[in-house]
Image (spheres, helix red, strand yellow):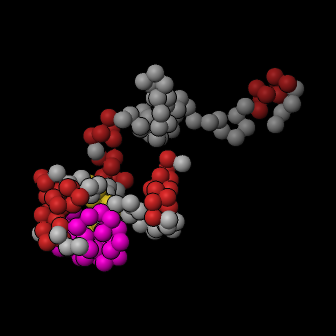
Amino acid sequence: MTWLSQRVNGLINENVEHPREPNSGNNGLVPYQTFAASDTDFMVCVGSDRVWAKFCEVIDRSEWTVDPRFARNRDRLTNRKTLVPMMAAIFLEQPRAYWVERMHAAGVPAEPVNTLRESLALEQFEATGILAPPLAEVGMRLVALPLTFNGIRPYPRSIGPKLGADNELLANHNGTAL
């Protein structure tokens, strides 16, 4: 049920069963979703009205903090269909790096939405040890399991046997070939 907490909260607090949206939006907070910048996407996470005020400063819309349609999160939820397109238009004016840097400077949670290539290039990706060392017999790397045992991540030790490679062993073991 924890994974559904936003939807459950909407149902028990608003008596509304929100349909699954085909975007990254959050049913309980606005804005808390991805937006397209002029070059690529980024995520903005405004989790309180205090952060909303900082956010409005960043996008040069301080008047929104006193606009009765947007002043409080509950107001923004009610007026989401009006507000989100207004914000989306603003973000298209500058590249992702511009918005993320300004949000960080103001204390507004925001991060790039990375491509797989960008993610693989991040220091923290390598630091997780999620990529297994190359398997000698095939010369390729694989993604390891996303867990550790006593602080050690289990890596694949070999690839599976080729089709029929164990037939002789099995035939000698139980008298039957596969």
Is residue 165 found left or right of 119 in the rendered image?
A: right
Dividing the picture into quarters, in which one does residue 80 lie?
bottom left
Which residue does the image show at 33% across and 49% down from the upper left? 119
Position of the C terminus by quadrant: top right
Magenta residues (range): 69-96
Q: Is residue 27 left or right of residue 82?
A: right
- Please name the residue shown 70% across and 34% down the image: 165
**Outermost residue, right side:** 175
Q: Position of residue 90 (x, y in %)?
A: 20, 73
Front position in the image: 72 or 27:
72
Which residue is painted at 32% across and 34% down in the image? 127
Tell me: 172 left or right of 10: right
In the depicted view, which residue is nearer to us: 147 or 109? 109
The front one of 158 and 113 is 113
Report if residue 34 is visible in the image.
no
Q: Position of residue 18 (x, y in %)?
A: 49, 66
Say which residue appears at 25% left-offset and 70% top-offset: 70
Magenta span dominant secondary structure: helix
Q: Is residue 157 above or below residue 4?
A: above
Q: Is residue 104 magenta?
A: no
Residue 2 in sight here: yes
Q: Is residue 78 magenta?
A: yes
Give left or right: position of 104 versus 137: left
Q: Position of residue 150 (x, y in %)?
A: 46, 21
